[in-house]
Image: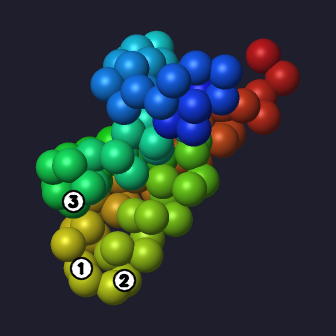
Amino acid sequence: ILYRKGHGVEKDEKKEIYHYEEAAIGGHPSARFNLALIDRKRYGRDRATKHHIIAAGQGHDGSLTWLLENHRRGGFVKKEVLGAALRAHQAAVDATKSPQ
């Protein structure tokens, strides 16, 4: 976020993307969500959808909402893909509620 907004550093899109990619690889769902937003503009909805599927599977509500809305609107998120994302999202949410 620092590189995107230029807080304390010079704005640098390449560094912004690099750090989001590193964080996403490290399992941070919000970084994956942000990559989806960036990649939608750069590469199109197919690549963005893949990021949203992964982030939803990590429990990211915003990515799940994006998948639901794009299934309802245009149908390019197929029913089977949405179902799998819903199940993975629920499993991730349930895992965070576990006392163990």
| Res 75 label | 1
The quarter of the picture where the N terminus appears is top right
Spatial separation of the CA atoms under disc 1 and disc 2: 6 Å
**In this rendering, would 25 be left or right of 61?**
left
Q: Tell me if residue 24 comes above or below residue 73 in the rendering.
A: above
Front-lying residue, 84 or 54: 54
Residue 52, compared with residue 27, is above or below; it is: below
The reply to whether residue 58 is in sight is no
Closer to the camera, 36 or 56? 36
Q: Is residue 72 visible?
A: yes
Q: Which of 84 and 27 is in front in this view?
A: 27
Say which mark, if any, is on residue 45: 3
The spot of residue 24 in percent (x, y) is: 43, 24
Q: x and y percent of residue 58 in the render?
A: 51, 35
Q: Give the Cα distance between marks 3 and 1.
A: 12 Å
Residues packed near mark 1 inside 10 Å, few (<14), some (14 to 19) or many (20 plus): few
Mark 3 or mark 1, which is nearer to you?
A: 3
- For numbered disc 2, what is the local secondary structure? helix
Farthest residue in the bottom direction?
73
Callout in the foreground (3, 2): 3
Vertical comparison of 95 with 82: above or below: above
Q: Which amino acid does label 1 sit on?
A: Gly
Residue under numbered circle 2: 72
Between the C-alphas of marks 3 and 2, the distance is: 15 Å
